[in-house]
Amino acid sequence: MRLMGLTDNKLALPLLALAVILLTNLVLSPEFFHLQLKDGRLYGSLIDILNRSAPVALLAIGMSIVIATGGIDLSVGAVIAISGAVCANLLNSSVDSLTLVILAGMCAGLVAGAVNGSLVSIFGIQPIVATLVLMVAGRGIAQLINDGQIVTFNNDAFSFIGVGSIFGLPTPIIIVFVVFLLAQLLVRLSALGLFIESIGCNPKASAYAGLHVRSIKFTAYCFSGLCAAVAGMIVSADIQGADANNAGLWLELDAILAVVLGGASLAGGRFSIPLTLIGVLIIQTMTTTIIMSGVDPKYNLLVKSIIIIAVLLLQSPVLRAQMGGLLVRAKTGGEARP
Amino acid sequence: MKSRYLPVAATGALFLFLLLAGAWQFPGFASPRVLLNLLTDNAFLAIAALGMTFVILSGGIDLSVGSVMALSSVLFALLVENYGWHPLEVIPFVLAVSAVFGALMGALIHVYRLQPFIVTLAGMFFARGLATILSEQSIPIEDPFVDAVNNFGFYLFDRAWLSSAAILLVVVFAFGLWLAHFTRLGSYIYALGGNATSAALLGVPVGLTTIRIYALSSCLAALSGIVYSFYTASGYALSGLGLELDAIAAVVIGGTLLSGGYGFVLGTVAGVMTMGLIQTWISFHGSLNSWWTRIFIGGLVLGFIIIQQRITAGIKKR
């Protein structure tokens, strides 16, 4: 459990929520857990969920690191658009090397993250506003790169990122797994995770203890930008194009939601990437359940909001105290312990 | 000049600068007609931004503003068109419903100590979802009262048209000014934003104030939706997407600190007008593409928060 980063009881609630939703799916559609192997590739509802949640999962991994330092990154959706635009335009130009295109996309994300990071760590600006700037201006920049068009390309090698499969699983799932593994090992096998949590809990004390608060915060935003760039490449490879207006639209909110559903606090401090990924799965499974249940998709947002509030309330210590108080009164027949 | 007036003064100066630069570049840019049109076209954003100002002054945030606006516009169109209510009956009803919605969010935030960002995010999904359920299509409004209000106005000098929306904007902001500086609730809001713990110790009713702030914000967002319904003569569930971000940008440009406790209602007016002026400048220019608006506004917000940050650092040193 040490490798998970959080104690056992924090795992219970998100896993329970996910289990409830999965079981509901099973009731609605008995073939839900059914997996099929065709032409060396796995098919099934579970694979679908994992595949579709890949961009948000990547955003959420970066987001949980940023939130853990006590910040937030609203610009990741716009960075998806920017990296998609950069890659699409390079693929259409005379550049031949796929590696160069991918590196350029990642650089775009790193630059965006660096801008955010310097605003927060060097200028000391509040993360919400600092990243709001790029969120607003970023799509404008992506439009600028695309010259106002929806740029399409025809490159099978790049599209493999979105539609191909490795070891029978869709490529996006493998990409998420690799990024998750790298991030988790980096954060838990080194002291970096401890430093990040410390900065989120108490930046001043961390600085006095000798931590390089600014550098670590800067790195966190760069990492978030990088994750967003990779997500952007998956999104654009999927549609074989770059749509500056719609790529990654509102995905940052889903990423933040996933981090909170995983039990992390928006004020910073303790975090857990596995729990965040469970949060991502909760959101995606919820969407799938609504579609599978045959309920009109227009109820999607409403159900989502009710489930969010329910999970938040259950996580709230105040509600637990209230419920605990009720239980105690029931047991001791009217004498509530203080 | 006291340092706390500096951000607002900076906004005002910027607005004047943009106005003069535009007037020098394009004839007719600084005409009363263009300026009054600015008021009319941005009335709905300004009203929503006023609600957002109060929330941000108290140290919170309200992401549900755009969705409440859409919900109220759909509700208004639905009740007037499909159920035959008179607009004057619908307006108080919609305002009351939205105030209850906001109060619920405020209660959740205070009682269960949930963070405003997430609660209002859930509220955003809820309101948007409700609006979509009520009507997925846009509902056109053909009501004589709505037409009359839309046509109501005064011709001021030089063919400048003072519309009902502009008049409402002035009235709402006068109310906002009165609330912020002449009522107890206003002082409670500023106190809460400055330091919530100190405010509680001073006797500020934190819970009640929080509930009232979010109720006010949702109420003003609903009013904004009604104004928008009149303006477009329709109700559409997908309107107001991203309105909350525009409102936050307007509030920040207007000199209010996001951490709470510092800021002025008039600053928000200046912020909204500045954003509208940039858009007017781009449309006068003609050959610049619309995405430059986003880049300019992003740059503006950036410039302002850097100014704000310098001032806060200066205030803290004293």
Image (cartoon, rainbow, N blue to C red):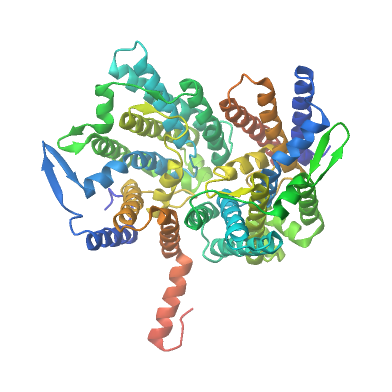
Quarter that holds the C terminus of chain B:
top right
Q: Is residue A70 left or right of residue A291?
A: right
Residue A330 picture location, percent across and down? 40, 85
Question: Up-down: is A219 above or below A48?
Answer: above
| Residue at screen point 31% across, 52% down | A288
Residue A134 picture location, percent across and down? 53, 32
Residue in the foreground of this view, choosing between A223 and B9? B9
Q: Is residue A167 left or right of residue B125?
A: left
Residue B216 visible somewhere in the drawing: yes
Quarter that holds the N terminus of chain B:
top right
Question: Up-down: is A109 above or below B93?
Answer: above
| Residue at screen point 47% across, 46% down | A200
Residue in the foreground of this view, choosing between A229 and B161? B161
Name, please, the residue furthest toward the bottom. Answer: A333
Residue in the foreground of this view, choosing between A338 and A244? A244
Residue in the foreground of this view, choosing between A177 and A249? A249
Residue B173 picture location, percent across and down? 77, 49
| Residue at screen point 45% across, 64% down | A313
Residue B63 picture location, percent across and down? 56, 49
Question: Up-down: is B41 above or below B96?
Answer: above
